[in-house]
Amino acid sequence: MPGVYIKTLEIKMEQHLNNLVSNELSNTQQSLRENVLSAIDKYFQSMDSAQASNLPNVVLDEVEAAMYESIMRYTRGNQSKAAKVLGVSRGTLRTKLMHYFSTTHVGGIYRV
């Protein structure tokens, strides 16, 4: 059941990150925070207290994966543009893409 709420968090993050990249930062910052808070609250409600461990790493991994997915969609798989938008080197981008998506976005292959 927690996976459903993590997927919801990913979807909401992707929607809001698309808005951020489209220069709608001022209107999106608060709603992004509210959506993350709501998703985390739902996550806690779906589990017992014994399961709640390592939450910061779980949330950060899920948010980062959604962000990289969103950026790759926004740039239509162009790694150079994605790296520039993210403010990282292409090497760092490729490392993250391999970590989160295996070969989905690496080696010139882009699949939605």
Image (tube, helix red, strand yellow):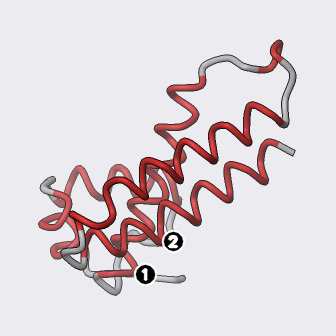
Q: Residue at x 17, y 67 (%)?
A: 85
Q: Residue at x 55, y 41 (%)?
A: 37
Q: Are marks 2 and 1 in contact (CB under 8 Å)?
A: yes
Q: Is residue 68 above or below residue 72?
A: above
Mark seen at residue 100: none
Which of 42/14 is in front?
A: 42
Q: CA distance from mark 2 to mark 1?
A: 6 Å
Q: Position of residue 26 (x, y in %)?
A: 21, 63
Q: Position of residue 57 (x, y in %)?
A: 51, 28
Which residue is the extreme one toward the top? Answer: 50
Left/right placement of residue 67 relative to residue 89 reads right
Secondary structure under tag 1 reads loop
Q: Residues within 10 Å of mark 1 (few under 14, many from 20)?
A: few
Label 2 sits on residue: 104
Q: How many marks?
A: 2
Mark seen at residue 109: 1
Q: Of the residues shown, which amino acid type is indicated by label 1?
A: Ile
Q: Position of residue 54 (x, y in %)?
A: 60, 19
Q: Of the residues shown, which amino acid type is indicated by label 2?
A: Thr
Left/right placement of residue 93 relative to residue 44 reads left
Q: Is residue 68 above or below residue 75?
A: above
Secondary structure under tag 2 reads loop
Q: Residue at x 41, y 67 (%)?
A: 16
Left/right placement of residue 96 relative to residue 38 reads left
Q: Residues within 10 Å of mark 2 (few under 14, many from 20)?
A: some
Which of 108/88 is in front?
A: 88
Instruction: Quadrant for the N terminus, please.
Output: top right
Left/right placement of residue 42 relative to residue 70 reads right
Instruction: Quadrant for the C terminus, please.
Output: bottom right
Which of 101/24 is in front?
A: 24
